Image (cartoon, rainbow, N blue to C red):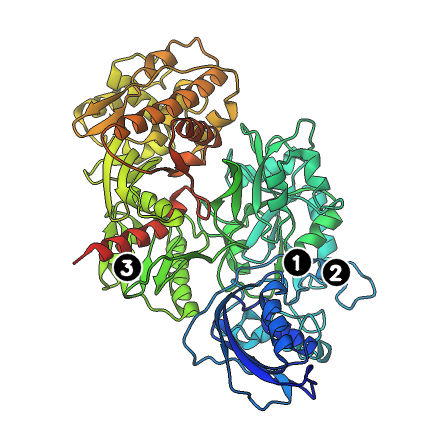
Amino acid sequence: MPYLVVERGTRQRGGVSDARRWVLAGQVQGVGFRPFVFRLARHHGLTGWVQNQRGQVEILAQGAAAALEAFARGLLEEAPPLARPRLVLSEPAAPCGSDGFEIRPSDATSESRIHVPPDYFTCDQCLAELADPEDRRYRYPFINCTQCGPRYTLIARLPYDRPNTAMAGFPLCPECAREYGDPLDRRFHAEPVACPACGPRLSFGVAGQAPMANTTATLAACVEALRAGRVVAVKGVGGYHLLCDARADAPVARLRAAKPRPHKPLAVMYPLAGADGLGAAQVDLDLRPEEADLLASPMRPIVLAARRPGGHLSPLIAPGLTEVGAMLPYSPLHHLLLGDFGGPLVATSANVSGEPVLTEAEEVERRLGRVADAFLHHDRPILRPADDPVFRAMGGRMRPLRLGRGCAPLEIEWPFRLAAPILAVGAHLKNTIALGWDDRVVVSPHIGDMGTPRSLAVFEQVAADLQALYGVRAETLVCDAHPGYTTARWAARQGLPLTRVYHHHAHASALAGEHGGAGPWLVFTWDGVGYGEDGTLWGGEALLGRPGAWRRAGSLRLFRLPGGERAAREPWRSAAAICWETGAPWPAAPAGTGPLREAWRRGLNTPTTSAVGRLFDAVAALAGVTVEASFEGQGPMYLEALAEDSGASGPELPVARDGGLWRIDWGPLVPWLTRGHLAPEEVASGFHEGLARALVAQALAIRQEARFERVGLCGGVFQNRRLTEQAAALLTAEGFAVHLPSALPANDAAISFGQLVEHAARSAARP
């Protein structure tokens, strides 16, 4: 909403009047920055104005020189907690003749320098009001202010004014309008501001019963349903969660059976407790300091943390694993539900089979009606989905496994200017998209796996929304080289210039682009499978060079996957493959594999791969850990959880020349695994240790022939903390400078950014 606020008669301090102009960029929209500037100018007795100009803020202030100097320091040092201002310009200016300080209407015609804020948690001041029986917003589930509340999922277009948000349909009551218009109120132009009289409302329904709409009654009914062991679908900030009691086996088992999600770990949300808010979580979890800090941070992500012996969580939360994905409430509705329930709740995304999280009441009831026993809806629209982000401690710091609500859209510094806007459409699994223009790159929140019509629809919406929000229209597209990917086929239909980037080149370029520097690099890109330059399925590569000029210097011994893509969910196929390749017997092989072996022998539907992810699957199956997988990465995750610091060693995996490559030979694993004398824990520990040593041996062999300065570890395999930290320690001991992804996940969520980096590097190299 365009607005004009003027404070008249502000007296200047110090006599002589100077004037100065500033332009600030960065995170200065949706965080109360202009009201902050107004109050700061008032404090220093300055006159002038502040104006939003589509993502940048321009300020002209006049007054005593000392006051202007203090004001300038305060713009950066005293900015609101959620603001991240960056000074673009500071210069003398002609006095404006104003006798007060004003917030001028937003200028939507100025050149775009927009920064779209993510969704924020509920601040301490709003929580205090939420719990205060004397406050008019007492227990109101949509309380917020300039320092908290939804943003990305709420903004329809910029500038960030109320008519441009999902709150446009909720006219302000007189009391909210007064707060909204008072520069000294912390809700001054808090665009989502609302109260029980004028804002969004809850409704609660159980199958076969009429829904109730009284907020107090709906909350009580929802908590009663949870205490009765029911599964409730609850609409949050970026989509719906499926909630149930995390301490009781029966509701968790019913949720797993109905979704169906038999083994994949479920996230748990804990109520705030204790001075730091972590008291309830610490009953069940052994939190590292960095995990505790991030868990309680404004981002409020899911943090993977070790389960504490003697905790009260149902063992069905994360079967076979030693870690639990935990988070704290981030919306006022969550705070109310968790506080009233009095214990942890399962809070898993309400979606279907890797799709984006659901956001609409009708759709969630239609598609998840067999899963949820009841539904807690609200009428504030979610304009685009945003799933919860996930982080894990690795290599001494917290690293993302999934981007989402609270940390995305993610802006990444770009070392040069692009000639034209580019949209990179990412990978097939764990999809994100990246928009690049000028010297800026924005990576979207997690979208999901691109195997369903709804995933494609959300992908198209996010691609359109990012361009519309930032005022940028892509002139070039970048996609994966795999011709069958949904994203690649979509890109080919758009009629724009199209660049195809090999999957593992994108992985390597993402890491190099994040850490900067020209290289040369040696980047280990280990994952499941990705389409390689030679038409085989890569996944165990060591790439030498720099973005735009990668050369495969190392790989894994090849093997053929019987059944192709089915091997990802049936690890026994990978196990059978490495046994058949080496002629070793596998007495525990599933019955009836004879016809499959004959098809493998004849080369029917048996693509060749070098994927370390499939080797992990093979080891998990041969060790009897996971023969059939119900989710991607189940076998590798179980192996990591089983690995102990027992000192067990695996066989040495030789590194030898194979044409122009140094290959790691997994062959010695087969007799070691098939003799059947090792416990699964010994297999897991020895395999991790042996694979880490083989990686370092490969790096040393390549260093004998080529010069490179830095080593990178990326790809989904390096979400494995045990392998990653062992390999990094051994590499460092050999004098290598080791880099891991930090701002972006190691997995395919980084592919879109890597595609942009690779395309830009190639373009810069052209004459």
Q: Earlier in the sequence, mark 1 or mark 3?
A: 1
Residue 130 circle label: 2
Which secondary structure, mark 3? Answer: strand
Q: Nearer the viewer, mark 1 or mark 2?
A: 1
Front in this rendered view, residue 518 or 262:
518
CA separation in Å, label 3 and label 2: 47 Å
Query: In this view of the protein, can residue 632 be seen by the observer?
Result: no
Which secondary structure, mark 2? Answer: helix
Residue 748 circle label: none
Q: What's the residue at 39%, 29% (across, down)?
A: 731
Q: What's the residue at 38%, 30% (across, down)?
A: 735
Furthest residue toward bottom: 97
Q: Position of residue 469 (x, y in %)?
A: 44, 68
Residue neighbourhood size for the residue with mark 3, other residues' Cα within 10 Å, grouped as few (<14), some (14–19), many (≥20): many
CA separation in Å, label 1 and label 3: 38 Å
Marks 3 & 2, CB-CB < 8 Å contact: no
Q: Quarter of the image containing the C terminus?
A: bottom left
Vertical relation: 594 (above or below) 135: above
Q: Is residue 295 left or right of residue 605?
A: right
Residue neighbourhood size for the residue with mark 2, other residues' Cα within 10 Å, grouped as few (<14), some (14–19), many (≥20): many
Q: Position of residue 11 (x, y in %)?
A: 70, 85
Based on the displayed image, in which of its 4 quarters is residue 707 positioned?
top left
Residue type (three-letter) at the residue carrying disc 1? Thr
Vertical relation: 727 (above or below) 195: above
Marks 1 & 3, CB-CB < 8 Å contact: no
Residue receiving disc 3: 477
Residue type (three-letter) at the residue carrying disc 3? Leu
Residue type (three-letter) at the residue carrying disc 2? Leu
Marks 1 & 2, CB-CB < 8 Å contact: yes
CA separation in Å, label 1 and label 2: 10 Å
Query: In this view of the protein, can residue 740 be seen by the observer?
Result: yes
Front in this rendered view, residue 290 or 41:
41
